[in-house]
């Protein structure tokens, strides 16, 4: 089960990254280009935040139930803090990815509630941009970029 969920988590990562870039680029173009807020802008925000939710659920399944890495870290948290790889997955990765999910949802919610198109684009650009930065920081770049099984 672990290899399957890990592979799914790896593949959904790229869906999240692509949707994050698309939603953020559209938001910046709308903000600086003074464009109207369109159904596509809204849909990209929904898809981005939804894909983050799927990724978060897969990650939590790995974190608490399937991963031997976090399993070892959670058994002896003190020792895990002195091991950079264990610390990354036990603390840094999960905290920063939670923050990214929160930023994506805040951006989606605030852009949905804003009255004017300029505000919608500005809020989406800022919060989606911050979410992308958090995601880029917390991706384990030393691991395989594509994992199939």
Image (tube, helix red, strand yellow):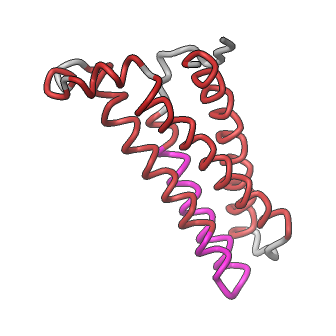
Q: Residue at x 71, y 40 (%)?
A: 18
Q: Residue at x 70, y 85 (%)?
A: 116
Bounds of the magenta segment: 109-134
Residue 111 image offset from top left, x and y in percent:
64, 74
Majority secondary structure of the magenta segment?
Answer: helix
Position of 26 relative to 19 (above/below): below
Left or right of residue 16: residue 42: right
Position of 86 relative to 41 (above/below): above
Position of 101 relative to 75 (above/below): below
Q: Looking at the rendering, which quadrant does residue 86 occupy?
A: top left
Q: Residue at x 40, y 17 (%)?
A: 68
Which residue occupies the foreground of this view, 48 or 35? Answer: 48
Residue 89 image offset from top left, x and y in percent:
37, 28
Left or right of residue 8: residue 76: left
Query: Where does the C terminus fall, quadrant-wise?
Result: top right
Residue 10 image offset from top left, x and y in percent:
61, 26
Extreme residue in the right direction: 39
Extreme residue in the left direction: 78
Which residue occupies the foreground of this view, 24 or 13? Answer: 13
Residue 64 image offset from top left, x and y in percent:
41, 33
Which residue occupies the foreground of this view, 98 or 74? Answer: 74
Left or right of residue 35: residue 6: left
């Amino acid at each position: 089960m672990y290899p399957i969920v890990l592979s799914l988590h790896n593949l959904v990562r790229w869906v999240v990254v692509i949707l994050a870039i698309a939603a953020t680029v559209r938001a910046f173009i709308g903000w600086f280009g003074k464009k109207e807020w369109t159904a596509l802008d809204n849909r990209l925000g929904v898809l981005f935040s939804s894909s983050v939710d799927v990724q978060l659920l897969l990650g939590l399944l790995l974190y608490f139930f399937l991963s031997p890495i976090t399993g070892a870290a959670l058994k002896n948290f003190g020792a895990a803090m002195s091991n950079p790889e264990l610390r990354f997955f036990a603390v840094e990765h999960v905290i920063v990815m939670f923050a990214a999910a929160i930023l994506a949802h805040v951006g989606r919610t605030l852009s949905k509630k804003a009255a004017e198109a300029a505000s919608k684009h500005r809020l989406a650009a800022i919060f989606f941009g911050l979410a992308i930065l958090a995601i880029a920081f917390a991706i384990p770049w030393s691991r395989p970029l594509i994992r199939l099984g």
